[in-house]
Image (spheres, grey):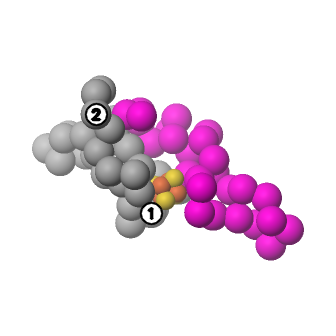
Amino acid sequence: MMLPQDEARLKFCPLLKTSDDKFRMCQGTQCMMWRYKDTAQAGAGDVGYCGLAGKPAAG
Ligand code: SF4
């Protein structure tokens, strides 16, 4: 799923949990796994994805 990081921050991260075992939200560019669709367009509103599952097939 390609989306801007402000939208990604509203999605749950499959890795991050709170101390009481609840999922936390995506951290966007604060996370080493965040990838931009186009590295030449790496601004706050530019689309990207979580690199955990590889690059999305379409988008
Ligand atoms: S980019 Fe990082 S914080 Fe966001 S969902 Fe992926 S692993 Fe979690």
Q: Which residues are magenta?
A: 1-26
Q: Is mark 1 within 8 Å of ligand 1?
A: yes
Q: Which mark is residue 31?
A: 1
- Position of 31 with respect to 22 (left or right) is left
How crowded pointer 2 is (Cα within 10 Å; few <14, some 14-19, many 20+) is rated as few
Q: Report the amino acid beneath label 1.
A: Cys
Query: What residue is at 41 percent from the left and 57 percent from the top?
Result: 52
Q: Mark 2 or 1 closer to N-term?
A: 1
Circle 1: element type? loop
> Is residue 29 something one can see in this rendering?
no
- Dot 1, crowdedness within 10 Å: few (<14), some or many (≥20)? few
Name which residue type carries label 2: Ala
Depth order, front residue of 20/28: 20
Q: Which mark, by number, is residue 57? A: 2
Q: Position of residue 26 (x, y in %)?
A: 56, 52
Q: Residue at x 40, y 51 (%)?
A: 53
C-alpha span from label 2 to label 1: 22 Å
Looking at the picture, does residue 57 appear above or below residue 32? above
Which residue ends up furthest to the left in the rendered image?
40
Q: Nearer the viewer, mark 2 or mark 1?
A: 2
Determine the residue located farthest toward the top in the rendered image: 59
The picture quadrant where one finds residue 55 is top left
Could you tell me which residue is drawn at 32 percent across and 38 percent down?
A: 56
Point 38% across, 66% down: residue: 32
Q: Picture quarter containing residue 47?
A: top left
